[in-house]
Image (spheres, rainbow, N blue to C red):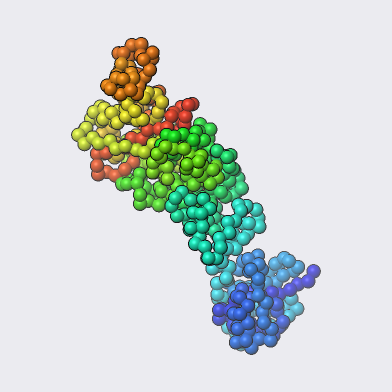
Amino acid sequence: MTVELVALVKHDCPVCDQVLPALDAAGVRVLSQSDPADTAAQAARLGLRNVPEVDEDLEVSARFDPDAVPTLLLLEGDEERDRVEGLQRARMRELAEAAGLALDLDDLPEMRPGCGSATRDPAIAARLAARRARAEGRLKSRTLVVGGLEDPFEALFERGVTDGLPVVPPTPERVVAMLEHTSRHPQEVVGVLPPYDGEATVEKVAINAVMAGCQPEALPVVLAAVEAACDPAFAVHGLLATTYPAGPTVIVSGPLARAIGMNAEGNCLGQGNRANLTIGRALQLTIRNVGGGRPGREDLATHGQMGKLASCFAERTWDSPWEPLHVERGLGEDETGVTLMATEAPRILTDQLAREPEGLCVSIAAAAQAIAHPKQRMLFDCLIVSGPEHGRVFAEAGWDKERVRRRIFELTHARAGDLARGAGGSPEGLPPEAVTDPDALVPKFAGPERILLVHAGAEAGLWSMVYGSWVSGELGSQPVTRSVEPWR
């Protein structure tokens, strides 16, 4: 089989300038990583007899992927036998002799480091990685062509893939960079999303994570959230179709939350933290763009609420009075979990005077009674986000989650007579035939386990937050927890 010597160079490399005259004189095949104009100018400047070939689309450079140029490759057919990167006079002569050539390098230094290969330029490397991913079948999503005179941000609005805010254009380069942060194959199906049964592949989730503005290291969390949303117990189809103003809230619990910069402290339910906002947004964009859940068409919420744009926060585990949510729900302490719950917007609970857990539970119960309507019973669940100062009250008294939940459950019972239609002047309530004993106590929630407790927020302020769920249990949506670890 024929042995051939091939050199890779570029026009703005001083070491290439030193070596090129000798390569040209010896008849070595030279491929330039530069464009034709710069390649020709370099040849003229150095007085070369032959203008180097241009490595079109850097195909040869990408295949052999050197760290530096000049690079001499000793090829036998299509296979590499040996290489030299940079100027190494003795080694270059060895490769030339193996190819039956003689290199006159006497006037050159014995050794000199080369310049970075064009394939190491971050922008070029990203483009080559995207091209390779497409060729290998790791990227399969169709390409949206944006005209040269179009504004890409406006074009994405017009094509209906945004949530009303600008999105980051999901170029192949950005998507491939995102995919580097999961070990799963891009074409693996995370789940099927209604209403149109769109297959949420890892690639498609990554595309929506790019559009949401996620940092790549957050992708495993987004994948776990999408997996949770696809669980039939979460009932995302019903959540989309309901006129109730609920949407998915993502609660991230475990060590990865802090590692990717999620906020579990001040303003954790609000603006300002990229990880919190973009993870929640990526889930919603995936539901919209893969499943087809578009507001005003498939998403029928009468009013909606801003949590339907992005509702996501991390649990403050390091000083929590309770075991972390992911551990409570069956995951290992060292794992990171994503719990998805269908919720309305949160309401504030203000109690700046309670110093004992009993009184604080009374206040929390009063807020929880108002979920949906004070007379609505056993249709909704509850998520309580205890601030650290309220959490300290429970911690100092030694009240674990089970005790807090049980007491709130007891305190949210009400007399059947007070819940009847017309009682207190409100036509809402239990039908008259259901009230056989006006003094019978009716619970707000179907059981203590329907009250989720998490710990988050800043130290300053005696506040907690209370979320109501969408219709709970088999009639509606159940909280779903998934481990992030399989998606890393």
Residue in the image at 65% along x and 71% along y: 56
Q: Position of residue 271 (x, y in %)?
A: 35, 49
Q: Position of residue 159 (x, y in %)?
A: 53, 53
Q: Is residue 483 visible?
A: no
In which quarter of the view is residue 2 placed?
Answer: bottom right
Q: Nearer the viewer, residue 198 or 97?
A: 198
Q: Nearer the viewer, residue 414 or 44?
A: 414
| Residue at the extreme left | 353
In which quarter of the view is residue 35 placed?
Answer: bottom right
Q: Is residue 488 above or below residue 87?
A: above
Image quadrant in which the N terminus is located: bottom right
Residue in the image at 25% along x and 36% along y: 350
State left or right for residue 74 relative to residue 343.
right
Q: Is residue 391 above or below residue 105?
A: above
Q: Is residue 130 visible?
A: yes
Q: Nearer the viewer, residue 147 or 113?
A: 147
Residue in the image at 74% along x and 73% along y: 4
Q: Position of residue 116 (x, y in %)?
A: 55, 72
Q: Position of residue 242 (x, y in %)?
A: 46, 34
Residue in the image at 65% along x and 53% along y: 137
Q: Nearer the viewer, residue 383 or 181?
A: 383
